[in-house]
Amino acid sequence: MEASMTKRAALKRQTRDLSREPGVFDSQEFAHEAKVRRLPTHTGWSPTPSNDERDQAYVKTLKPKSDGQAELLTAIDHHNLVLALGPAGTGKTYLAVAKAVEALEAGRIGRIVLSRPAVEAGESIGFLPGDMEDKLAPYLRPLYDALSDRLSMKRVKALMAEGLIEIAPIGYMRGRTLNNAFIVVDEAQNCTYVQLKMLLTRLGWHSTMVVTGDPQQSDLLPGISGLADISARLEAIDEIAVVRLAERDIVRHPLVASMIGVI
């Protein structure tokens, strides 16, 4: 008796499976005679998507929020050397790093090189413990923040371990030739004219360099910063783009734009 009931239940299930469209939910499968429901294998669905898909979904759409930002993004797309000058909060570093990540993900470059001067903002923090990376971490933290906002931190660490993303102070850039790379030089107002000349001449084949900074906010002694001078000289070269952002391009808190105009 029990065997015949089991056989009839099996025939019912087989009839339903043949008459039902693939992928359509059938509540009868959860009746008492169906103890286990097999997951469909014909749909291509997987409970564990690849890390690439997960990281790709993490990246936000990059859109300019002002005319100045739109000009900067266009300049990066059409020039190998771009100088972005403007006050705090205009998105200079963020847009440059975002375009670098976009180029790396698209396969247009082989690596990202981010550089920043290790200059204290008017306050000596003394000797820091740890090795070289630990000592430089506070100075390079803004670059990590910009990267982690475009990629998951797990992917950032993986790319750095593979050498596809390199974050280095300006002092370690001399003597190098950066081919097939996207170079971002941040806080360039804290570089001297000689340092900037050294950095700009690192540009190699199939590479893009974006130099960002605010000439009005240098932490060096007056007259030491070389950003304003070198940008004025390079502005005469057609192949080099010098984008000057203004207070209207500030996308940080509205109070920042108000303060910049009076302080």
Image (cartoon, rainbow, N blue to C red):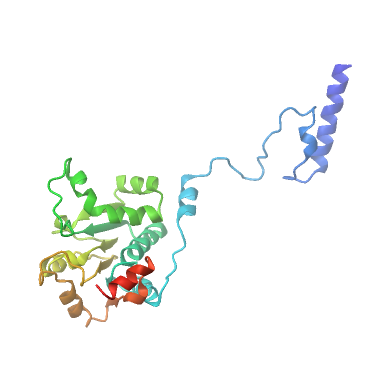
Give the percent coordinates (x, y) of residue 81: 27, 71
Seen from the viewer's position, the closer of residues 195 and 93 is: 93
Q: Quadrant of residue 257?
A: bottom left
Closer to us: 26 or 134: 134
Q: Is residue 119 left or right of residue 90?
A: left
Report the front residue among 240 and 138.
138
Residue reaching furthest top? 1
Rendered-image quadrant of the C terminus? bottom left
In the displayed structure image, the side of residue 224 where residue 185 appears, left or right:
right
Image coordinates of residue 197 in percent, x first then y, are 14, 69
Residue 237 x, y percent position in the rendering: 23, 81
Q: Is residue 191 above or below residue 105?
A: below
Tag count:
0
Residue at image coords 47%, 62%: 61
For the point 17% across and 79% down, the residue is: 233
Q: Is residue 90 visible?
A: no
> Is residue 18 shown to the viewer in this render?
yes
Residue displayed at 67% across by 37% down: 39
Residue 127 is left or right of residue 251, and the answer is left
Q: Relative to 29, does residue 1 appear above or below in the rendering?
A: above
Q: Which image quarter holds the N terminus?
A: top right
* Quadrant in the rendering for residue 48: top right
Residue 5 % position (x, y): 87, 22
Q: Is residue 62 above or below residue 248?
A: above
